[in-house]
Amino acid sequence: MLKFNFEEQLKNTIDDFAKSKGIEEEIKFVVEIPPKNINADLALNAAMIIAKKMRTNPRIIAQELIEIIKKDFSNIIKLAEIAGAGFINLHFTDEYLQGELNKILDKKENYAKQENIKQDKIMVEFVSANPTGPLHIGHGRGAAIGDSISRILKHLGYNVVKEYYLNDVGNQMNVLGESVKTRYRQLKGEDIPFLDDGYKGEYIKDIAQDLINEGKNFEDIDFKKESHTRILETIKKDLQQFRVDFDSWFSESKIAVDKDENGETEVDKVCKYLLDKGNAFEQDGVLWLKSTDYGDDKDRVLKRTDGRYTYLASDVAYHKNKYERNFAQVINLWGADHHGYVARIQAAIQMLGQKKDALKVILYQLVSLVRNGQPVAMSTRSGDFVTLKDVLDEVGTDACRFFFLLRASDSQLDFDLELAKKQTSENPVFYVQYVNARCQSILRDYKEDSSGANLSLLNTKEEKDLIKKLISLEDILLICAKTKSPHHLTTYLIETADVYHRFYEKCKVLQENKELEKARIQLLKAVSTIITLGLSLLGVSSPSKM
């Protein structure tokens, strides 16, 4: 516990103090971890907010608040002092830090789990790449973000379901089947042109060649079904290698093809529902969604003049299905090129009776491959993109996932292939993993029992800084859950490695003072626990030897 839980504990104290000053409204203060150049554990701005409402000197209010905080939180705060115009800087007691360190040692991999999380179901839908080709590195970034968000939410105690939406209906699947059929005939020696709009990747030839090698008769092959099945198998294998598994694979055919006893699909029914509710209208043979009523820049087509539904119609039906499965919140991860699609989907879910915040869309930016500082051409034998498997095979799953998570999802990412392969501290994933390996090496050499260690002996600046960093994991995970961005955890692990290395340089662990040795061994156990837990939530391994 650091910022978030303490902020919650302070709330009643601050509100009561404000009421004593005649202020009835809620005080929206914040507790912050101050910059590194400020010698404090936390900083509180409540005095400045209250003073502004009272039109008085914030330092006077700060001094009054300090007396109350020292009295109410004497077990947590040993020093509270005024800084600047009226900030209150707070310093933790040694006993509090030792108690939090003991929590890590006691709870181990269960550290930071929350006890009062609402058990409403949350769906995280991600990747959902069309099954018309292998996953590329853009899909890989979305997979890493979506899977890590899910792992963090699950660890905190949320009821999370991970789903992959299979866009397996429509003309794209017909074109896929025809592409493989044409390559099959060409490989059999027929002199025929390839489709102008066909899928041209080398993987199309590979599927056709496999069908030939299996000796199947041309007339007996369902090219669309065979192509879809084989590509989906490839996608699942790549995701397995990437340590991503889904709880549910949802086929578009369930809502766009399957019919009820009245001969209607889910898409038919949702469009009829929107029309009946006045949220859609027909004009010149076209069915339109009135998305402008909910903030979209223009109305959108649901059904064309030829009777074919648009992707939007299927997506509206799919989201209706999500909420019918009792998901309180839906999180979608989409590539940044889908930014224009967000407003119309948010409009649609509100038309379906959901609150706007029942849907959270995370847009992630492109990945650029770099080798030794130079851009890598985004072209391989698989077509006009670099596949996820290409990168996995070159740098490994650990580096691939960690690098994809180094930046916020809305920031473009440069992925340095050579850096990702280095077995040195320059490589951030190696740098973090090495902390656990070094801890485990020392722990293997230690042959005594360190239980019952006197943790009050951990009183150097380096030791206290390390303890504070370790116990802030809980805060970091709550921030990740709130922002739906796991890059905060990646940054935290790198910073924790920095703090650990400073400790390791100044504080000898195995030594003549056996009581201090026991305490530092316990600290190393906590470091190993936090690094291993943090990496696992990113889908990255923690080798004990490197």
Image: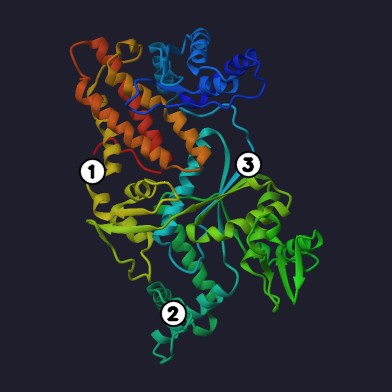
Residue 223 visible from this viewpoint: no
| Mark 3: few/some/many CA within 10 Å (<14, 14-19, 20+) | some
Whether residue 36 is situated above or below residue 178 in the rendered picture:
above
Between circles 3 and 1, the one closer to the viewer is 1
| Mark 2: few/some/many CA within 10 Å (<14, 14-19, 20+) | few
Of the residues shown, which amino acid type is indicated by label 1? Glu
Left or right placement of residue 540 versus residue 60 in this view: left
Helix, strand or loop for disc 2: loop
Between circles 3 and 2, the one closer to the viewer is 3
Of the residues shown, which amino acid type is indicated by label 3? Lys
In primary-sequence order, the first of circles 2 and 1 is 2
Q: Residue at x 52, y 14 (%)?
A: 61
**Contact (CB < 8 A) between labels 3 and 1?**
no
Task: Residue under label 1, please give it.
Answer: 426
Helix, strand or loop for disc 1: loop
Q: CA distance from mark 3 to mark 1?
A: 40 Å
Q: Position of residue 252 (x, y in %)?
A: 62, 63
Of the residues shown, which amino acid type is indicated by label 2? Gly
Q: Position of residue 38 (x, y in %)?
A: 35, 23
Residue 284 visible from this viewpoint: yes
Task: Residue under label 2, please give it.
Answer: 215
The disc label shown at residue 121, or none: 3
**Contact (CB < 8 A) between labels 2 and 1?**
no
In primary-sequence order, the first of circles 3 and 1 is 3
Q: Residue furthest left?
A: 512
The disc label shown at residue 543, or none: none
Tell me which corner region of the image, top left, top right, bottom left or bottom right, holds residue 439.
top left
| Mark 1: few/some/many CA within 10 Å (<14, 14-19, 20+) | few
